[in-house]
């Protein structure tokens, strides 16, 4: 059991607008209530509209911190991964969201921060200090990060190579990385569509966690983490298990 320590909130002193866009944002009572209501609504929607099913939930670590990584082809992806979590993990989950899209204006920022509990990642201009903050919070606050290391949604459904930012969060730590594969998300809400398409089935397959405590926290180590996580996610793709024609 960890010793209890009193410390001020990480976002103490920030203005409301700055708090929404801050990597140090913490949930207050209002945020917790809104997020809980949102989670219930999302689970109900995914079940009713997409017959959402989860396999491999037993592979999730018993408690945070850990990182969920998956293929990325739809705005439903983060919602589906978050919907698979229960208990403290669900309450402490933060989706890493594109800052230029989800934090572009106050209204969208408020939805992303208080409903989805997203943290901003600024594509093309994230600083090393930002990733250091995320790494520190993940371990010290016992969070769950929902991360899509491709960096953007696939327009074709084919998964792109993973970027090394994942390694900067976990290399040299005991924090598990849990590979996941989402099947059907692109059909349910493709990147080219403004709204989801109901009655397309959606499935999530969760694989055994990976650990990188022996991996160096340097560029080579980050790339090694990304490559290992990418291979583990690809291995969960149901199509990779089907025999190819002509063999």
Image: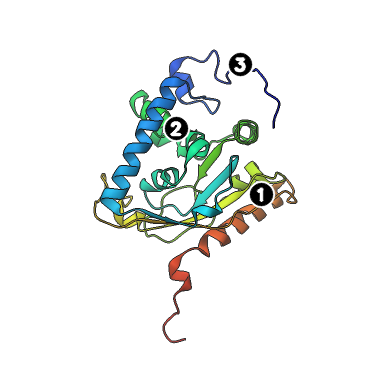
SS type, badge 2: loop
In front: mark 2 or mark 1?
2
Quarter of the rendering containing residue 40: top left
Q: Nearer the viewer, residue 231 or 159?
A: 231
SS type, badge 1: helix
Q: Nearer the viewer, residue 154 or 28?
A: 28
The location of residue 154, given as percent across then percent down, is 41, 54
On the question of residue 149 being in view, the answer is no
Q: Residue 194 vs residue 87: left or right?
A: left
Q: CA distance from mark 2 to mark 3?
A: 20 Å
Which residue is found at the position 62% from the left and 58% from the top?
Answer: 228
Work out whether mark 2 precedes mark 1 in sequence or the reverse, and give the earlier one: 2
Marker disc for residue 8 = 3
Marker disc for residue 81 = none
Marker disc for residue 117 = 2
Q: Quadrant of the N terminus?
A: top right
Work out whether mark 2 precedes mark 3 in sequence or the reverse, and give the earlier one: 3
Marker disc for residue 222 = 1
Q: CA distance from mark 3 to mark 1?
A: 32 Å
Which residue is found at the position 42% from the left and 44% from the top?
Answer: 78
The location of residue 155, given as percent across then percent down, is 37, 55
Q: CA distance from mark 2 to mark 1?
A: 26 Å
The location of residue 217, given as percent across then percent down, is 72, 45
Marks 2 and 3: CB-CB under 8 Å? no
Q: Residue furthest bottom?
A: 246
Work out whether mark 3 precedes mark 1 in sequence or the reverse, and give the earlier one: 3
Quarter of the rendering containing residue 168: top right
């Amino acid at each position: 059991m960890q010793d209890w320590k009193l410390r001020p909130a990480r976002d103490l002193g920030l203005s409301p607008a700055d708090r929404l866009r801050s990597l140090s944002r913490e949930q207050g009572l209002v945020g917790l209530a809104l997020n809980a209501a949102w989670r219930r609504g999302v689970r109900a929607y995914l079940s009713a509209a997409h017959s959402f099913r989860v396999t491999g939930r037993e592979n999730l670590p018993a408690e945070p911190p850990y990182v969920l990584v998956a293929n990325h082809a739809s705005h439903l992806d983060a919602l589906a991964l978050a919907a698979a979590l229960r208990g403290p993990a669900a309450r402490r989950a933060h989706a890493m969201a594109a800052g230029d899209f989800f934090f572009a204006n106050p209204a969208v920022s408020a939805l992303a921060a208080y409903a989805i509990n997203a943290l901003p990642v600024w594509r093309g201009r994230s600083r090393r200090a930002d990733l250091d903050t995320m790494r520190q919070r993940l371990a010290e606050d016992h969070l769950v990060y929902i991360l899509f290391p491709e960096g953007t949604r696939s327009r074709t459904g084919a998964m792109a190579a993973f970027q090394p930012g994942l390694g900067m969060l976990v290399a040299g730590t005991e924090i598990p990385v849990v590979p996941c594969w989402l099947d059907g998300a692109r059909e349910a809400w493709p990147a080219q569509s403004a709204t989801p398409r109901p009655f397309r089935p959606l499935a999530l397959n969760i694989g055994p966690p990976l650990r990188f405590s022996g991996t160096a926290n340097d560029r080579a180590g980050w790339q090694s983490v990304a490559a290992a996580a990418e291979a583990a996610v690809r291995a969960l793709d149901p199509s990779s298990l089907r025999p190819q024609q002509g063999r």
